[in-house]
Image: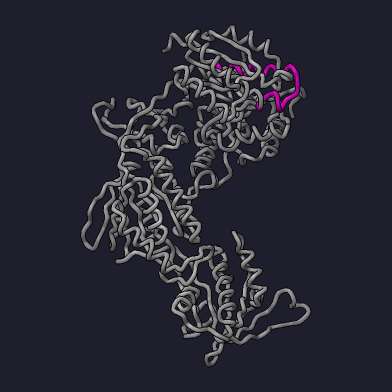
């Protein structure tokens, strides 16, 4: 448990154009709310996610996730499988450099799951909050 | 372009929807301080028509070459702004949209934090805009010939539809005459035509059409190339001839396996399969006053075809021959246009429906069929089993893809889906499409279907082919990933991971590396998923609009 209860983690969400991004729009339509320090970056498919993106994101944020289409339902057939592999690769890298591998993750949802989007973001936010600040973050 | 990047930032308050939560004044002053930003404008409603013209004017006046729209980022609005940019003479891909509406004002309350987030989003958008690249269009000469595999109704219908849209068609049928399975059917659900007549009409239309070339006894041996430039090797007997085609339609259909042993029966005159019943009815066999039992379900529940056919024939036998008809079923799957009605009609006409789950035993005894079954609903009150005596028993057949579907899938490089039928790509796009552009599926080869569906999908496929190959020269937006040949080591990673087969390895002096070759993406096939770009170990591949530079610039612009 983090000593600082006021700690507000920053989360970067890489959202697949066909699911996560649309789900965030759906969440907005439903007038749901999630923490402010969650930023979205649009990618054309979760398969576009790169270890480099994750690592760069972790320079700025406390946690990062990729939102992919449901399993077996990727528009590009195996993009979400690739993304899961990439997440695993990043986890290994993080372990090596002594950062908690839980700071990166992949979540599956569909375009009409605004509620689920908020749930995922909130849960991840809470998890990172408990983990505390990212030790690898660049401090200005 | 590097030095004279002039960014124009347009704010939209979406009729006050955004500004009630987020204060644009502060963001505007911050954005103005950013380098390269030459012009900033506030607006009530940017997507109004007049505003579009105003943006056009401002772009020319201030010589802007990158546009950032801050407001929402929906696909519809994006299309509108791209049009505006095109009108102003700026490449439509030099547009960066920032979604303040949905990412900030709709989901957060008015607070210092949400204001900070809005500013951050705006900065990210501007940072991305600085890295945007132009995307041009390319002219490609394509072959417009369509190769249709399978001369059943689906194949013929597609051939006719494609021919009507000006394509040359080669219709390859592996048997020695056209017709397929429809020739063996008595009546068609939902189509008020005699199948034989319908088939004759289609065969006549196909054979007399000057732009359709029918090749019987022919199958596809091998395939090379991509949409607009396939080379197909057609095998006839021992000879193999290459033909150049632009698109391929698989309409290879389904086949049935009749297996009475599964129900503990041997082959006999009064034990018949569904297709045999159709044949007998078409031949005019008299069933007057007979007692006929139909069994559906148990092992054939994957597709609703056998259910609907059973109900159709039960109704027909009852009405035409006044026969006693019993239908034994585990489930009745008749969801579809008018099928439910057909089912109720069958009940009203006096067809007996008996439900069973596991307990059914069928025995043949001196030309009579004894069916012992247990009703799962009244089992508790009136213990079974009940026995029903019949003159005929009609068993469902197993539906499996036509012979050679698996080999064909390998040749076409597409996947097989459930029950080893051809896999339809997925729910995101048209069901007739496969994972490769230029290869389409019609009819029962993707899952056993109905005649009326075939007619619709044949039209959809012909329309899709026409959309792609509308002329001998087609203009394609070059949005496919591009390869930096000096970084490419021809490791084939991208080639292996591309889900659409869009990547080829090209050789030539222009490629600046040791191997004088590099991976190249075909813009007509590529669907811009970016998997290759992410997978490339040498970072040689970049996906336009989502290059590493652009994404990293966004991350860079973010506050810690």
Quadrant (top left, top right, bottom left, bottom right) of the C terminus of chain B: top right
Q: Nearer the viewer, residue B79 or B238?
A: B79
**Residue B234 at x, y percent in the picture:** 27, 55
Q: Residue at x 47, y 20 (%)?
A: B87
Q: Main secondary structure of the magenta part?
A: helix
Q: Residue at x 74, y 82 (%)?
A: B383
- Asked whether residue B493 appears in the rendered view, the answer is no
**Is A133 on the left or on the right of B420, as rendered?**
right
Q: Residue at x 60, y 41 (%)?
A: A108
- Asked whether residue B304 appears in the rendered view, the answer is yes
Q: Give the answer, above or below, for where B316 lies relative to B506.
A: below
Quadrant (top left, top right, bottom left, bottom right) of the N terminus of chain B: top left
In magenta stretch: residue B113: yes
Bounds of the magenta segment: B102-126
Q: How many marks?
A: 0
**Residue A7 at x, y percent in the picture:** 73, 23
Q: Quadrant of residue B137?
A: top left
Q: Quadrant of residue B364?
A: bottom right
**Residue B266 at x, y percent in the picture:** 48, 83
Q: Give the answer, above or below, for where B102 lies relative to B318.
A: above
């Amino acid at each position: 448990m983090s000593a600082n209860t006021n700690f507000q983690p920053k989360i970067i969400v890489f959202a697949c154009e066909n699911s996560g991004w649309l789900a965030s729009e759906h969440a907005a339509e439903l007038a749901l709310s999630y923490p402010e320090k969650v930023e979205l970056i649009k990618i054309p498919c979760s398969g576009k996610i790169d270890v480099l993106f994750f690592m760069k994101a972790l320079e700025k944020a406390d946690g990062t996730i990729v939102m992919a289409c449901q399993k077996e339902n990727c528009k590009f057939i195996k993009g979400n499988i690739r993304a899961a592999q990439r997440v695993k690769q990043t986890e290994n890298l993080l372990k090596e450099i002594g950062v908690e591998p839980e700071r990166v993750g992949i979540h599956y949802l569909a375009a009409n799951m605004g509620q689920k989007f908020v749930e995922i973001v909130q849960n991840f936010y809470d998890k990172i909050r408990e983990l505390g600040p990212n030790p690898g973050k660049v401090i200005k | 372009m590097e030095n004279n990047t002039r960014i124009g930032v347009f704010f939209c308050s979406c009729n006050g929807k955004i500004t009630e939560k987020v204060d644009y004044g502060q963001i505007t002053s911050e954005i103005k301080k950013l380098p390269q930003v030459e012009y900033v404008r506030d607006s009530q409603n940017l997507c109004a028509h007049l505003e579009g013209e105003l943006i056009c004017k401002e772009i020319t006046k201030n010589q802007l070459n990158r546009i950032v729209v801050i407001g929402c980022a929906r696909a519809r609005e994006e299309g509108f702004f791209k049009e505006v940019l095109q009108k102003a003479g700026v490449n439509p891909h030099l547009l960066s949209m920032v979604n303040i509406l949905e990412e900030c004002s709709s989901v957060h309350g008015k607070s210092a934090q949400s204001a900070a987030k809005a500013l951050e989003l705006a900065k990210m958008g501007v940072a991305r805009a600085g890295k945007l690249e132009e995307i041009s269009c390319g002219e490609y000469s394509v072959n417009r010939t369509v190769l249709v595999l399978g001369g059943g109704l689906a194949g013929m219908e597609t051939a006719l539809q494609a021919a009507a849209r000006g394509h040359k068609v080669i219709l390859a049928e592996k048997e020695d005459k056209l017709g397929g399975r429809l020739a063996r059917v008595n009546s068609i659900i939902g189509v008020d035509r005699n199948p034989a007549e319908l088939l004759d009409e289609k065969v006549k239309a196909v054979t007399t059409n000057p732009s359709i070339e029918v090749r019987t006894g022919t199958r596809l041996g091998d395939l090379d190339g991509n949409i607009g430039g396939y080379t197909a090797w057609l095998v006839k007997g021992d000879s193999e001839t290459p033909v150049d085609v632009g698109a391929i339609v698989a309409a290879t259909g389904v086949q049935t396996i009749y297996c009475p042993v599964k129900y503990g029966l041997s082959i006999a005159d009064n034990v018949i399969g569904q297709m045999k019943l159709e044949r007998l009815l078409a031949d005019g066999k008299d069933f007057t006053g007979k007692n006929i039992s139909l069994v559906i379900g148990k092992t054939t529940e994957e597709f609703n075809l056998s259910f609907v056919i059973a109900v159709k024939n039960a109704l027909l036998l009852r009405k035409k021959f006044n026969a006693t008809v019993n239908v034994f079923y585990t489930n009745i799957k008749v969801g579809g246009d008018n099928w439910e009605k057909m089912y109720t009609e069958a009940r009203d006409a006096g067809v007996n429906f008996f439900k069973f789950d596991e307990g059914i035993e069928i025995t043949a005894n001196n030309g009579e069929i004894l069916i012992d079954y247990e009703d799962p609903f009244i089992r508790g009150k009136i213990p079974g089993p009940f026995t029903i005596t019949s003159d005929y028993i009609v068993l469902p057949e197993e539906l499996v893809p036509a012979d050679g579907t698996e080999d064909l899938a390998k040749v076409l490089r597409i996947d097989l889906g459930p029950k080893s039928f051809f896999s339809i790509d997925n729910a995101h796009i048209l069901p007739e499409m496969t994972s490769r552009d230029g290869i389409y599926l019609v009819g029962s080869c993707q899952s056993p279907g109905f005649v009326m569906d075939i007619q619709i999908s044949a039209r959809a496929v012909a329309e899709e082919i026409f959309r792609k190959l509308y002329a001998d020269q087609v203009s394609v937006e070059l949005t496919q990933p591009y390869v930096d040949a000096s970084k490419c080591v021809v490791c084939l990673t991208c080639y292996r991971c591309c889900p659409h087969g869009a990547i080829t390895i090209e050789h030539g002096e222009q490629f600046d590396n040791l191997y004088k070759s590099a991976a190249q993406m075909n813009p007509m096939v590529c669907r811009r998923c970016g998997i290759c770009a992410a997978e490339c170990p040498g970072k040689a591949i970049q996906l336009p609009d989502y290059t590493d530079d652009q994404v990293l610039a966004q991350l860079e612009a973010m506050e810690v």
